[in-house]
Image (cartoon, rainbow, N blue to C red):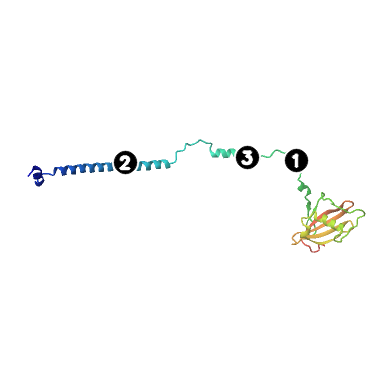
């Protein structure tokens, strides 16, 4: 029996070749495990490093504060400018005392001793309603006649009523051919007036006075 056969049959002798192969495989496996471990560590480091970079990128950049004038001071400056611009230009005392056109045309208001009359309006600025009539004047109270229509124009020129939105209760002679008087009211009778006019030769019918009535009873 050869020596090799004796070693193979002798259980006390280690299988040298097999052991060497096994040791070689163990070393290779250990190398692989070491390499895998290193790769895992590197992967973990890369992942955490990437997350930190992303979070840093998301954080807003710090802004450098810019010194500016306080808002309160700016508002005060604007208010001062507006006050300067809004100051009215000085006027002469004479100009300031001059009455306006509406004040000049405003009627003079006086009281009346008649119970049906609240107040009386007169105004020296009232002018005759320009007439289109020529020749000798004849006063008429016929609707549609030029003299009648001019009477109405003169009457409505001094009261705050529209001819189409009012009621003419009466219009008649006021004592002679050169005078007339009319009683009118708003359609709801809230405003009531009695207006006296007179004829001015070659000029037309001129309003004389307006009586503001508180009732229509006995007014015409």
* Mark 2: few/some/many CA within 10 Å (<14, 14-19, 20+): few
Q: Is residue 85 left or right of residue 144?
A: left
The reply, left or right, for residue 123 in relation to residue 19 is right
Label whose residue precedes the other's in the sequence (3 or 2): 2
- The residue where tag 1 is placed is 95
Q: Position of residue 71 (x, y in %)?
A: 54, 39
Locate the C terminus and report the quarter of the image it occupies: bottom right
Please tell me whether mark 1 sits on a helix, a strand or a loop.
helix
The disc label shown at residue 42, or none: 2
The circle on residue 214 is none
How far, Cα to Cα, is label 2 from label 1?
A: 96 Å
Residue 150 image position (x, y, % from top left): 85, 56
* Residue at (77% x, 46% y) in the render: 101
Task: Find numbered disc 2 in the image and state the secondary structure of the residue it sits on.
Answer: helix
Q: Residue at x 56, y 38 (%)?
A: 74
The residue lying furthest to the left in this view is 1
For label 3, count other residues whose C-alpha is less than 10 Å away and answer few (under 14), some (14-19) or many (20+): few
Q: Which residue is mark 3?
A: 82
Residue 109 in sight from this viewpoint: yes
Q: Nearer the viewer, residue 191 or 5?
A: 5
Viewer-closest of 13 and 65: 13
Q: Say if 142 sits above or below 20 in the image.
A: below
């Amino acid at each position: 029996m050869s020596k090799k056969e004796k070693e193979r049959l002798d259980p006390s002798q280690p299988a040298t070749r097999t052991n060497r192969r096994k040791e070689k495989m163990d070393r290779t496996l250990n190398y692989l495990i070491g390499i895998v471990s290193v790769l895992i560590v590197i992967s973990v480091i890369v992942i955490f490093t990437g997350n930190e970079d992303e979070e840093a990128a998301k954080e807003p950049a710090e802004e450098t504060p810019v010194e500016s004038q306080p808002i309160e001071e700016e508002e005060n400056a604007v208010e001062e400018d507006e006050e300067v611009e809004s100051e009215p230009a000085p006027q002469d005392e004479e100009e300031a005392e001059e009455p306006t056109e509406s004040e000049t045309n405003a009627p003079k208001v006086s009281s009346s001793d008649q119970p049906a009359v609240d107040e009386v309006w007169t105004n020296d600025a009232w002018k005759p309603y320009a007439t289109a009539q020529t020749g000798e004047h004849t006063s008429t109270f016929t609707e549609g006649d030029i003299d009648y229509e001019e009477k109405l124009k003169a009457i409505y020129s001094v009261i705050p009523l529209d001819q189409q939105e009012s009621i003419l209760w009466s219009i008649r002679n006021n004592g002679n051919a050169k005078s007339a008087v009319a009683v009118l009211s708003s359609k709801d009778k809230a405003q009531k007036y009695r207006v006296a006019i007179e004829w001015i030769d070659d000029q037309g019918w001129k309003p004389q006075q307006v009586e503001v009535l508180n009732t229509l009873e006995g007014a015409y």
